Image (cartoon, rainbow, N blue to C red):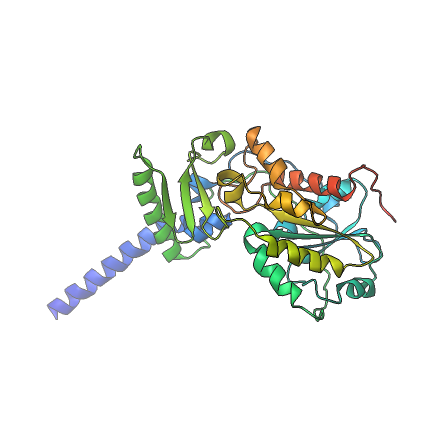
Amino acid sequence: MKHAKLFSIIIFIALMLYGAFGFYTLPLAGYEGGITRVGKLPESLFGWTRPQPAINPALLQQATWQEADVVVIGDSFSAGRVWQTELIAHGLKVRTLPWRWPVCEDIASWLSAQGFRGKYVVIESVERVAKASLTQWVECKKTLLSEKDQGNALPPPLVFDREKKDYSGQMQAGFDTWRNMREYERLAAQPNFKSKSYNKVKIVRMPDGCRLFSHKNCRDVPFLTADAGAKELDDEVIRSMEILNARLQGFSPLWVIVPDKSTAYLYPDKKFWQKAGERVPSVNLLEPVRQAIHEGVVDLYFANDTHFSTTGYLLMGREIYRNLDPAGAVSAQH
């Protein structure tokens, strides 16, 4: 009986210590960015700290089919509708569809059937999934999905409190993040540190990191290992773009391939955007992104995410608007 009682006390103490440590580490699992979530890395080290531009909520309105001048088919870079505010600020009315909308063989008649009478169709994809997505679209015969009203989007945050205590995450994620943090801090303190991978995230030491990012450990920047890396998008992607363009008879399509974050900072010499622009109407987004980085724009992409900051989205929107109408004569039709 004495041994059983002692064993029970030991188990109780162990559980109490486990719970206390779990409560201590749990806030580390309050991730704000996609990269910190995937890599289980702390926002206190990689969360952005410089305020972002404010977006007027009135510019985030979703146009009806009947009044839209532009239809956007895009992935998560378009879902927040931030870059679209640049078009709307210039008088265009925009309707955004989720990326799951394939550009099937009947896309032109499907758009007309929804009531779209505008001119422009902007098709956006991030670089790392472009080839797979476009290949799938080329095979699509008929649009079977029904479109639901997405409502109005919310303005992105101006600031991010990287020290905020968030206890809504999972305890195990807090443990893992604490362990990763301790290991990373030990390795990063070594003068020869170059990189370290955590799950599907790779932290890379960048000589000019603190010129380009505002997070606490700005010398080191996390990137998604699923990015294309040094690999170029090939001619097959451009051929798919040409096939899909041919389906949009009666409309003016414009392609926007968003450079992966690793392309923008680590592999900037890719030629795909230039080649694509010679064959299909498209935005060479890599060029202004690289120019902004050269000029020292801070947090163009967020360190803790794969996506643009508000600053980056506004740059993207300006480039798309400029390519919709190079002469600057675009005006709303309604």
Tell me what residue is drawn at x 73 percent, y 67 percent. 105
Task: Write down the quadrant of residue 241 in the picture.
Answer: bottom right
In the image, residue 219 above or below residue 238: above
Q: Residue furthest right?
A: 334
Residue 49 location, x and y as percent?
Answer: 51, 35
In the image, residue 305 above or below residue 192: below
Q: Is residue 243 left or right of residue 333?
A: left
Residue 150 appears anywhere in the view: no
Tell me what residue is drawn at x 53 percent, y 39 percent. 268
Residue 20 location, x and y as percent?
Answer: 32, 52
Q: Is residue 179 left or right of residue 334?
A: left
Residue 18 location, x and y as percent?
Answer: 29, 56
Residue 102 location, x and y as percent?
Answer: 67, 63
Tell me what residue is drawn at x 58 percent, y 41 percent. 309
Please state which of residues 264 and 72 is positioned toward the viewer in this rendering: 264
Q: Is residue 87 left or right of residue 67?
A: left
In the image, residue 115 above or below residue 164: below
Please state which of residues 320 and 190 is positioned toward the viewer in this rendering: 320
Task: Write down the quadrant of residue 318 in the picture.
Answer: top right
Q: Is residue 63 left or right of residue 290?
A: right
